[in-house]
């Protein structure tokens, strides 16, 4: 290959290496750019949950817990397998006697060892069982973390939608107040109404402008909270796609309770913890039983040459092989350990009791959470229905007050009161809708539904109802 081609290839590799290695702040900047591109311009609820599960640090911590539990299981199962080791050492004799079969020179020794546990008193199988339980518990903890993060995303997502709607309501109120102020000024200039109407309208504009400022601040806080839950920055200008209005069909409270006891990942984790405690108790008891193991060892040593004169064979060297090996079957039984085994058994027994009571307490707490979520959902439905009626009545009252004022029959106070009532009604409907969305999400979390199943169920119920 020509020298020039080799030089060009070397330069190309150097450029690639320089591009791959980005030290310090540059690497962080690249990571930030990569994460910022994760959030699409229009963000759906489902995509938001997917992003959170991928980038939220709490989920990653829980995911690594599964990896750690898998490592512990591998370590526990390794005790069932034979152990094979090899070692090599350099031996240099010092002060050998006049006659010795050992070479006076430095030599190498290589030792091969094979060992196998034949009986551990049940400790090894129970340790494997405990490790499997720990892994099941880690998997349950991961699922529960994902469900909690999904709930947090739904809560933040609905809060942003509510805040955006709140800004819209506040802006509409400001526009309406400014229009009323414009009309009041025209009527005052025409001598139809007193100056009081203008002053009242100006005060109304100043008051609702403060409400708009608060609504904008609440919206910005909602976006910041959603970004934190997702674990990635949300670019400016991102829009949220409005999911179908959540709907939850009537369900029997007892059915919900049974669903929760069967599906809640944290309850599965608690059951696994109880199984681990029971296995650990058996491991502690195994310390009071004998153990049996077998071993095979063989050592390879360099041959030693000894002068035959020492054995009456003058002029002939004798080659001596010093390789050696042995087979061992060992049984061990502890006669006295100062109470160590008894203490470990008592501790493990207490841990079993704690785990059992923990499961019992968690079941009671789950039943309470399901019942509370069920009642909150029923109340949220009623609040939305009442708020919708209130908005309809307030809109009609505002329409009538506006007509009366335009015709010179009504007063400025009537229309201001009507606007205030309509603003409050729309705000309460917005809050009630958020409460209904959150109540459905809370019930999904309480019964342990997977977030995909929960969202699809909500959408399917809404489609069927529509």
Image: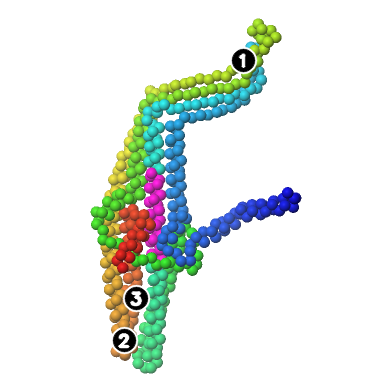
Q: Quadrant of residue 158?
A: bottom left
Label 3, on which residue? 423
Find the distance from the CA under tag 3 to the CA under tag 1.
Answer: 106 Å
**Which mark, by number, is residue 200?**
none
Please identify the residue farthest to the front as the structure is shown. Answer: 1
**Foreground label between 2 and 3:** 2
Label 1, on which residue? 320
Question: What's drawn in magenta, residue-wise?
Answer: 136-161
**First in sequence: mark 3 vs mark 1:** 1
Please identify the residue farthest to the bottom as the structure is shown. Answer: 190
Above or below 189: residue 62: above
Q: Are marks 3 and 1 in contact (CB under 8 Å)?
A: no
Task: Using residue 386 as the reference point, say whether residue 49 is left or right of it.
Answer: right
Q: Quadrant of residue 229?
A: bottom left
Say which residue appears at 44% left-offset and 21% top-offset. 329
Q: Secondary structure at mark 2?
A: helix
Is the C terminus in the top left, top right, bottom left or bottom right quadrant? bottom left
Above or below 43: residue 326: above
Label 2, on which residue? 403
Above or below 63: residue 198: below
Find the distance from the CA under tag 2 to the CA under tag 3.
Answer: 18 Å
């Amino acid at each position: 290959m020509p020298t020039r081609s080799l030089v060009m290839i070397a330069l190309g590799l150097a450029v690639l290496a320089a591009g791959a290695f980005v030290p310090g702040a540059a690497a962080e900047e690249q990571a930030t750019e990569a994460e910022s591109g994760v959030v699409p311009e229009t963000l759906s609820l489902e995509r938001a949950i997917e992003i959170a599960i991928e980038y939220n640090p709490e989920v990653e911590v829980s995911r690594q817990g599964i990896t750690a539990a898998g490592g512990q299981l591998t370590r526990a199962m390794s005790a069932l397998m034979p152990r094979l080791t090899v070692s090599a050492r350099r031996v240099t004799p010092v002060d050998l006697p006049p006659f010795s079969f050992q070479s006076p020179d430095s030599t190498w020794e290589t030792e091969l060892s094979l060992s196998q546990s034949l009986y551990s008193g049940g400790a090894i199988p129970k340790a494997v069982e405990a490790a499997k339980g720990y892994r099941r518990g880690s998997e349950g903890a991961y699922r529960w973390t994902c469900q909690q993060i999904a709930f947090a995303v739904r809560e933040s997502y609905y809060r942003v939608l509510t805040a955006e709607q709140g800004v819209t309501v506040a802006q509409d109120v400001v526009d309406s107040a400014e229009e009323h102020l414009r009309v009041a000024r025209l009527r005052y200039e025409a001598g139809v109404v007193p100056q009081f109407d203008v002053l009242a309208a100006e005060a109304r504009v100043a008051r609702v402008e403060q409400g708009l400022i608060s609504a904008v601040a609440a919206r910005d806080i909602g976006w910041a909270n959603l970004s934190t839950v997702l674990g990635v920055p949300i670019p400016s200008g991102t829009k949220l796609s409005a999911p179908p209005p959540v709907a939850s069909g009537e369900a029997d409270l007892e059915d919900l309770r049974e669903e929760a006891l069967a599906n809640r990942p944290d309850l599965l984790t608690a059951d696994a913890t109880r199984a681990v405690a029971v296995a650990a108790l058996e491991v502690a008891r195994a310390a009071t039983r004998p153990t049996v193991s077998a071993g095979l060892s063989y050592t390879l040593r360099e041959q030693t040459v000894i002068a035959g004169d020492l054995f009456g064979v003058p002029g002939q060297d004798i080659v001596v092989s010093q390789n050696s090996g042995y087979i061992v079957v060992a049984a061990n039984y502890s006669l006295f350990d100062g109470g160590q085994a008894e203490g470990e058994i008592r501790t493990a027994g207490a841990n079993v009791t704690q785990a059992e009571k923990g499961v019992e307490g968690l079941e009671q707490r789950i039943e309470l959470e399901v019942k509370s979520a069920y009642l909150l959902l029923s109340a949220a439905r009623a609040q939305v229905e009442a708020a919708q009626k209130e908005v309809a009545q307030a809109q009609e009252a505002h329409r009538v007050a506006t007509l009366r004022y335009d015709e010179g029959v009504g007063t400025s106070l009537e229309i201001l009161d009507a606007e205030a009532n309509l603003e409050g009604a729309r705000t309460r409907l917005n809050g009630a809708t958020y409460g209904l969305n959150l109540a459905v999400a809370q019930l999904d979390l309480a019964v342990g539904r997977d977030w995909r199943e929960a969202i699809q169920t909500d959408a399917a119920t809404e489609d069927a109802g529509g």
